[in-house]
C-alpha cells in the first residue's frame, strides 16, 4: 500500500487541522516498501533482489539484501517499478533453513514480477515457466498447479496454510535442484566446444529449466508413503534426497560433459522460430525411429504465402506419417493416429473437425522469441518461446545428446543412447541445418470427441444399474442401449453395485491362485469412468491372469441429487471390470449446451487425478447418443525441431526418408483409413428379402479382412449364412481428398461390393450386386 506523508501545518492543530485550514499539504510518496519472504522453511542468510535486467543474477544495481531469521528482506521500490521485475534468491551454502538447518548445496529460487512478496520452490517453477514460454503468471500458475496435483495455488504460502502435500513437493524441488547441480558442478569454469567458459549463472539456468521437466515426478514422490510418513522435515528431506538421486540417474543430466553440450546450444541459440518470411518451410517436430520401416514422424509445414505475415500472423500445417514393416505408410494431419483424424471439437460457435488442409495460426515471435498460437480454430491455444541454433557442420550424435540433456525427448533415435550412438556414428549435419528449441504452454483447450460408433456410451439396463440381484446374476447381462441422453444417464447411475459371492481358485496362469477377497462388488454398471491410475495389463482369459486384481485404480463417478457428483476409487479385475469402489470425495457436475450438443463435465475432481492425467473426461450428448469426450488440460511441453535440411540428412543417415514439399497439400494413403467398419446391407426390389451384416478391418501393415452374415434365400441371392470376403481393395483420392473408394467380394458366392469411405466421419456406403442379378445397398460406420 502506498504510504502517505503528511506535512505539519502551523499552530498546534497537527497535520489534519493544518491541511484543513490551508496551513499544510499532503503528498504521495514516490516509493513503496516491498517485503519479500523466502521459504522452503523460512530461510535466513539468503541473498534476495529484484532482478531489474532479468539476467538471473543479483547484480550491484539490483541492490540485493540478505534475509533475516524470518526469511524476509524489505526493499524501497520506486512506485513506477512496483510489479515490474521478478524476485530472485540465491540460497548459498551456509544459509539456514529453519526446518532443516544449514543449506548444504547452493540453489536459486524466484517469483514472478506480479507476485514477488513470496519466493518458494513452487513460485520458482511458475516463474521458470513464465520465462521459458512467455505465458502469463496466471496461466503458468494454473498449469503448475495441475501438473503438481495441488489443491492450492503454487503462489500460496504452504507454511501458513497447512498444505503438507505442497510442503513435500517444495522439498522435492529443492533436493532435486541441489542433486542435479551437484552432478554438474564440474562444468563451471569449463569450456564448450566453441570456447565459451561456463559460468555458475549459466549452470543455474540449465538446472532450473531441467527441474521444471520433473513436475509430474514431484507430485508422485510427494505422495510416497516414506515421504508422507516421515516424522520430521529433516527425515522427509533425507528420503526425498535418496529418491531424487535415483530419479536423476535415469532422467537427469548425467554429468558435466553432457551439461557442456547442452549449454553450448543454449549459448548459440537466438530468439525466433526459424521460419523465414516469404519462404516455404518444413520442420521435423516429432520422430520415433526403431528401424527404416518402423518410423513415426510429424512435420510442421508452411508454403511461401502462408509464411508471409498477415496481421502479425503466419499459418502452418501438420503432416504426420508412419511407416510399417510391410511397406505401408499412413499419413494424416492431427491427433495421435489416422483413425482419430475425424475428432470433432467445439470452436466457440460450432462442432468442427480439423481438416487435413486446414491451416493453423501462429503470431510472429517478438524480440524474445515469444509467440501465441491457435491450433485448428480453437482446439488448442497457447504460448510458445522459440529459439534456433545453427547446427551445420556439427556431429549428429552430439546434437542428439545435447537435446536429450536439455529434456527434449520428442526426437527418438532407437530405443537407447547406445543404439543412437551406433546409428548416428560420426555423421554431421550439412550446411543450412537448424535446430529449433521450443517451450510451449497450452492455455486454452476445447471440448472434443471421436465420432465413431465404438465411442458411444452404452447405458446399462435400469435393474442392473440399481444392483438388482436377479439382473446381476443373470448369465447374460440385460440389454444396454446407446440411444440415450445425459439426463437418463444421470438418473440411472447412482452408485449401487452388484454384490457377488467371493471367488477363488487355482485357475490362473500356470495354476496361479486367484482370490477376489471377501468383498466382490461390480460397479461398472452404476458408475462412469473418469480415468485410471496404473499401467498393468488386463487379459482376455482367466487362465492368463496372475492375480484377480491388476493393481490399477479406476476413478469413477456416480450421480446424486442437485448436481452432486460422487467420486470413487475402484479396483480393476483381471478382465478390466470395475470392482469394489470406495468413496473418494464429492464434487459437482455441470451440463452446458454448446450448439446442438450438451456437454457434461465435473468440478472438484479427486486429488488422485490431479497431475496424473493431461486431460479430463467429459461426456457429450449429440445426435441421439452420448459419447466419451475429453478436454486437454493446460500443460507445459518442450520439443526440439529440425529444419528440412537437417531432418533429411538425419533420415538419410538412418536409412529412411520421405520427401516433404511444404508447398504441396497432404495426400492420404490407403492406410490412413485404418479401422474396423461395421454395417448392414440389404436388397432392393430385385432381392427384397435380403439383409445382413458386414465387418471389415483395415489395419496399417496388415492384409485387410472382411466377413459377414445374411438371411438371404439362395433363390434371391448367393448370399446366405456367414461368409468371408476376398480382394478388399481401397483406393484413396488425390492430394486433399478425404474420400476413398473401396471394393470387396464374397468368397465363393460371387457378390461384389463397391462404395466410398469418408475419412472424417468414418461413414462407408455403396452398392452390391450378385452374379444372380440380385443387388442392393450397404452402409456402416468406423468403430
Image (tube, rainbow, N blue to C red):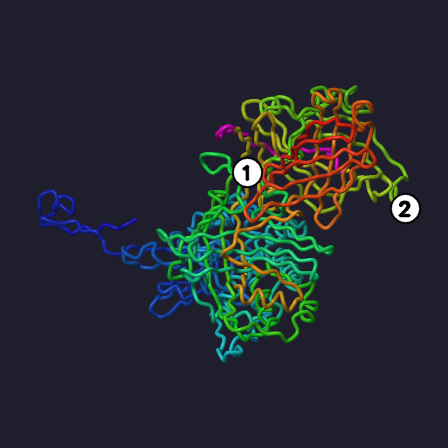
Neighbour tally class for label 2: few under 14, some 14-19, many 20 plus, Cα within 10 Å:
few
Q: Main secondary structure of the magenta part?
A: strand
2 or 1: tag closer to the N-terminus = 1
Between label 2 and label 1, give the one nearer the viewer. 1
Judging depth in this view, the residue of 481 and 119 nearest the camera is 481
For the image, the number of numbered tags is 2
Q: Quadrant of the C terminus?
A: top right
Q: Residue at x 65, y 54 (%)?
A: 322
Task: Name the spot of residue 681 as percent of width and height, x first.
Answer: 71, 28
Q: Is residue 355 left or right of residue 25?
A: right
Q: What stretch of residues is rendered in magenta? A: 576-596
Q: Quadrant of residue 540?
A: top right
Q: Which mark is residue 344?
A: 1
Is residue 608 visible in the rendered structure shown here? no
Q: Residue at x 49, y 46 (%)?
A: 358
Task: Name the spot of residue 416 as percent of width and height, x first.
Answer: 69, 64
Judging depth in this view, the residue of 677 and 467 nearest the camera is 677
Give the structural element (helix, strand or loop) at label 1: strand
Task: Name the spot of residue 114 as percent of width and height, x first.
Answer: 38, 52
How far is disc 2 from disc 1 in space, using C-alphas?
A: 46 Å
Q: Is residue 318 above or below residue 205?
A: above
Q: Is residue 224 left or right of residue 703?
A: left
Query: Is 588 contained in the magenta span?
Result: yes
Q: Which mark is residue 510?
A: 2
Give the structural element (helix, strand or loop) at label 2: helix
Is residue 754 visible in the rendered structure shown here? yes
Query: Is 612 contained in the magenta span?
Result: no
Q: Is residue 378 above or below residue 775?
A: below
Judging depth in this view, the residue of 407 and 723 nearest the camera is 723
Q: Is residue 665 above or below residue 193?
A: above
Amino acid at each position: 500500500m502506498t504510504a502517505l506523508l503528511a506535512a505539519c501545518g502551523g499552530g498546534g492543530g497537527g497535520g489534519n487541522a493544518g491541511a484543513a485550514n490551508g496551513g499544510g499539504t499532503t503528498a504521495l510518496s514516490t516509493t513503496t516498501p516491498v517485503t519479500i519472504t523466502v521459504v522452503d522453511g523460512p530461510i535466513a542468510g539468503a541473498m534476495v533482489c529484484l532482478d531489474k535486467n532479468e539476467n538471473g543474477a543479483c547484480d550491484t544495481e539490483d541492490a540485493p539484501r540478505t534475509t533475516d531469521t524470518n526469511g524476509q528482506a524489505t526493499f524501497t521500490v520506486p512506485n513506477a517499478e512496483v510489479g515490474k521485475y521478478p524476485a530472485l534468491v540465491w540460497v548459498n551454502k551456509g544459509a539456514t533453513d529453519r526446518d532443516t538447518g544449514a543449506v548444504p548445496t547452493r540453489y536459486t529460487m524466484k517469483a514472478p514480477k506480479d507476485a514477488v512478496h513470496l519466493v518458494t520452490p513452487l513460485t520458482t517453477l511458475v516463474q521458470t515457466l513464465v520465462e521459458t514460454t512467455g505465458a502469463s503468471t496466471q496461466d503458468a500458475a494454473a498449469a503448475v498447479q495441475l501438473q503438481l496435483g495441488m489443491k492450492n495455488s503454487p503462489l500460496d504460502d504452504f507454511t501458513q496454510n497447512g498444505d503438507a502435500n505442497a510442503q513435500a513437493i517444495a522439498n522435492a524441488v529443492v533436493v532435486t535442484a541441489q542433486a542435479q547441480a551437484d552432478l554438474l558442478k564440474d562444468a563451471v569454469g569449463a569450456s564448450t566446444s566453441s570456447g565459451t567458459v561456463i559460468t555458475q549463472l549459466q549452470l543455474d539456468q540449465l538446472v532450473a529449466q531441467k527441474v521444471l521437466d520433473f513436475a509430474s515426478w514431484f507430485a508422485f514422490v510427494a505422495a510416497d508413503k516414506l515421504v508422507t510418513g516421515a516424522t520430521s522435515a529433516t527425515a522427509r528431506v533425507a528420503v526425498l534426497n535418496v529418491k531424487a538421486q535415483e530419479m536423476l540417474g535415469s532422467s537427469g543430466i548425467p554429468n558435466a560433459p553432457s551439461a557442456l553440450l547442452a549449454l553450448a546450444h543454449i549459448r548459440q541459440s537466438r530468439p525466433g522460430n526459424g521460419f523465414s518470411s516469404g519462404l516455404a518451410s518444413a520442420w521435423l517436430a516429432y520422430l520415433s525411429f526403431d528401424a527404416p520401416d518402423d518410423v513415426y514422424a510429424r512435420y510442421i509445414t508452411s508454403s511461401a504465402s502462408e509464411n508471409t505475415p498477415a496481421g502479425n500472423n503466419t499459418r502452418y500445417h501438420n503432416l504426420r506419417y508412419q511407416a510399417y514393416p510391410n511397406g505401408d505408410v499412413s499419413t494424416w494431419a492431427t491427433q495421435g493416429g489416422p483413425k482419430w483424424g475425424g475428432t470433432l471439437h467445439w470452436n466457440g460457435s460450432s462442432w468442427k473437425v480439423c481438416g487435413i488442409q486446414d491451416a493453423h495460426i501462429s503470431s510472429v515471435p517478438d524480440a524474445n522469441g515469444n509467440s501465441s498460437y491457435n491450433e485448428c480454430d480453437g482446439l488448442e491455444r497457447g504460448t510458445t518461446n522459440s529459439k534456433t541454433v545453427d547446427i551445420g557442420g556439427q556431429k549428429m550424435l552430439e546434437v542428439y545428446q545435447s537435446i536429450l540433456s536439455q529434456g527434449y525427448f520428442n526426437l527418438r533415435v532407437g530405443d537407447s543412447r547406445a543404439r543412437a550412438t551406433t546409428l548416428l556414428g560420426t555423421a554431421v549435419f550439412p550446411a543450412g541445418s537448424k535446430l529449433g528449441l521450443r517451450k510451449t504452454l497450452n492455455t486454452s483447450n476445447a471440448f472434443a470427441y471421436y465420432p465413431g460408433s465404438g465411442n458411444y456410451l452404452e447405458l446399462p439396463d435400469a435393474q442392473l444399474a440399481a444392483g438388482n440381484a436377479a439382473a446381476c446374476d443373470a448369465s447374460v447381462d440385460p440389454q444396454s442401449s446407446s440411444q440415450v441422453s445425459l439426463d437418463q444417464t444421470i438418473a440411472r447411475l447412482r452408485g449401487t453395485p452388484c454384490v457377488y459371492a467371493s471367488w477363488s481358485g487355482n485357475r490362473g496362469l500356470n495354476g496361479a491362485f486367484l482370490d477376489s477377497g471377501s468383498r466382490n462388488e461390480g460397479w461398472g454398471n452404476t458408475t462412469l469412468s473418469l480415468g485410471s491410475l496404473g499401467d498393468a495389463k488386463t487379459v482376455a482369459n482367466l487362465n492368463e491372469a496372475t492375480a484377480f486384481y491388476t493393481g490399477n485404480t479406476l476413478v469413477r463417478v456416480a450421480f446424486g441429487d442437485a448436481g452432486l457428483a460422487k467420486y470413487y476409487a475402484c479396483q480393476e479385475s483381471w478382465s478390466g471390470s470395475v470392482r469394489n469402489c470406495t468413496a473418494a470425495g464429492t464434487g459437482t457436475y455441470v451440463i452446458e449446451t454448446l450448439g446442438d450438443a450438451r456437454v457434461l463435465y465435473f468440478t472438484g475432481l479427486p486429488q488422485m487425478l490431479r497431475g496424473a492425467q493431461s486431460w479430463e473426461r467429459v461426456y457429450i450428448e449429440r445426435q441421439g447418443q452420448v459419447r466419451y469426450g475429453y478436454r486437454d488440460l493446460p500443460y507445459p511441453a518442450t520439443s526440439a525441431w529440425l529444419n528440412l535440411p537437417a531432418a533429411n540428412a538425419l533420415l538419410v543417415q538412418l536409412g529412411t526418408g520421405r520427401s516433404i514439399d511444404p508447398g504441396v497439400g497432404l495426400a492420404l494413403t490407403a492406410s490412413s483409413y485404418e479401422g474396423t467398419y461395421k454395417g448392414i446391407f440389404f436388397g432392393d426390389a430385385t432381392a427384397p428379402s435380403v439383409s445382413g451384416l458386414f465387418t471389415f478391418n483395415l489395419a496399417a501393415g496388415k492384409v485387410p479382412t472382411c466377413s459377414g452374415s445374411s438371411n438371404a434365400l439362395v433363390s434371391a441371392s448367393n448370399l446366405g449364412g456367414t461368409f468371408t470376403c476376398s480382394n478388399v481393395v481401397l483406393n484413396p483420392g488425390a492430394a486433399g481428398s478425404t474420400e476413398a473408394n473401396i471394393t470387396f467380394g464374397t468368397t465363393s458366392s460371387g457378390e461384389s461390393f463397391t462404395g466410398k469411405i469418408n475419412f472424417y466421419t468414418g461413414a462407408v456406403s455403396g452398392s452390391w450386386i450378385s452374379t444372380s442379378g440380385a443387388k442392393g445397398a450397404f452402409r456402416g460406420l468406423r468403430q
